[in-house]
Image: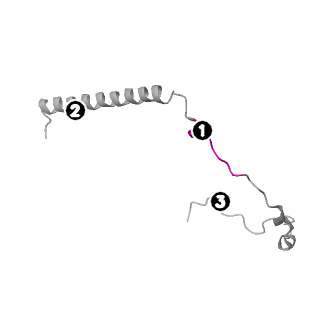
Amino acid sequence: MAITFQEQLKKQKNLVFIFLSLVLVTVFIIWWGYYYVGEEPREELIIKHFKKIEIDFELLENPLLNQLQPIEKIPPFEGEVGRENPFIP
């Protein structure tokens, strides 16, 4: 199926409209960011309330925690290391 000259012009016309709309949207976003975000922020938006962090150290005195034993050392692997080429079945 051949594309005629009229179809090419129609495609180009649509692409021009899409390009111009993208340019206008970009200009609007930049303008909005420059004029509205550049204002002094309101005080209500700046104030943040943080919770005070409290660490419960009594958990470390739990008798169950005292029963844990540290791992001394992991023993070396005993056995075959593997195949020369692992991708061969």
- The reply to whether the C-beta atoms of the residues labelled 2 and 1 are less than 8 Å apart is no
Q: Distance between the residues labelled 2 and 1?
A: 45 Å
Q: Hey, what amino acid is under mark 2? A: Asn
Residue 44 falls within the magenta-colored stretch: yes
- The reply to whether the C-beta atoms of the residues labelled 2 and 3 are less than 8 Å apart is no
- The reply to whether the C-beta atoms of the residues labelled 1 and 3 are less than 8 Å apart is no
Q: Which of marks 2 and 3 is in front?
A: 2
Q: Nearer the viewer, residue 76 or 18?
A: 18
Q: Hey, what amino acid is under mark 1? A: Ile
Which contiguous range is marked in magenta?
Answer: 43-51
Which of the 4 image quarters holds residue 19?
Answer: top left
Q: Distance between the residues labelled 1 and 3?
A: 62 Å
Query: Is 74 on the left-hand or right-hand side of 23?
Result: right
Which of the 4 image quarters holds residue 80?
Answer: bottom right
- Label whose residue precedes the other's in the sequence (1 or 3): 1
Which residue is identified by label 3? 84
Q: Which mark is residue 46?
A: 1
Q: Nearer the viewer, residue 70 or 88?
A: 70
Q: Position of residue 49 (x, y in %)?
A: 65, 47
Q: Which of 71 and 36 is in front in this view?
A: 36
Q: Which mark is residue 14?
A: 2
Callout 3: SS: loop
Query: Is 38 on the left-hand or right-hand side of 80?
Result: left
Q: Residue 62 carries which label?
A: none
Q: Residue at x 22, y 32 (%)?
A: 14
Q: Is residue 43 above or below residue 55?
A: above
Callout 1: SS: helix
